[in-house]
Image (tube, grey):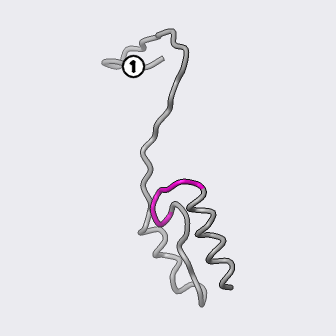
Amino acid sequence: MCEKNQQPIEKEVDTVILCTGLRSKSALVETFYGITPETAAIGDCVKPRKIMEAVFEGYSNAYTL
């Protein structure tokens, strides 16, 4: 189901692919700096990426603690 001119339209389909735009919220991340001695931005708050990149970045930052 979707809308056109604010009127619902129903269509029969075999597959639905949902794509959403992702954006990092760097301004929100910056509010955390200065709260603790060490703060690191990792994952999608830096920039939206694939899960493996975000996990590796998290691992790399945790390893340095």
When asked about the image quadrant of residue 5, the answer is top left
Residue with the most extreme left position: 5
Which stretch is magenta? 45-51
Is 19 a magenta residue? no
Q: Residue at x 42, y 12 (%)?
A: 9
Q: Amino acid at mark 1?
A: Glu
| Callout 1 secondary element | strand
The residue identified by callout 1 is 3
Q: Position of residue 46 (x, y in %)?
A: 47, 66
Vertical side of 25 occupied by 30: above or below: below
Could you tell me which quadrant the C terminus lies in?
Answer: bottom right
Q: Residue 15's spot in the image, x, y percent? A: 54, 20
Please identify the residue farthest to the bottom as the structure is shown: 37
Residue 8 on image: x %, y % = 42, 14
In the rendered image, the vertical position of residue 12 relative to residue 20, given as above or below: above
- Which residue occupies 51% across, 82% down? 33
Q: Is residue 15 left or right of residue 5?
A: right
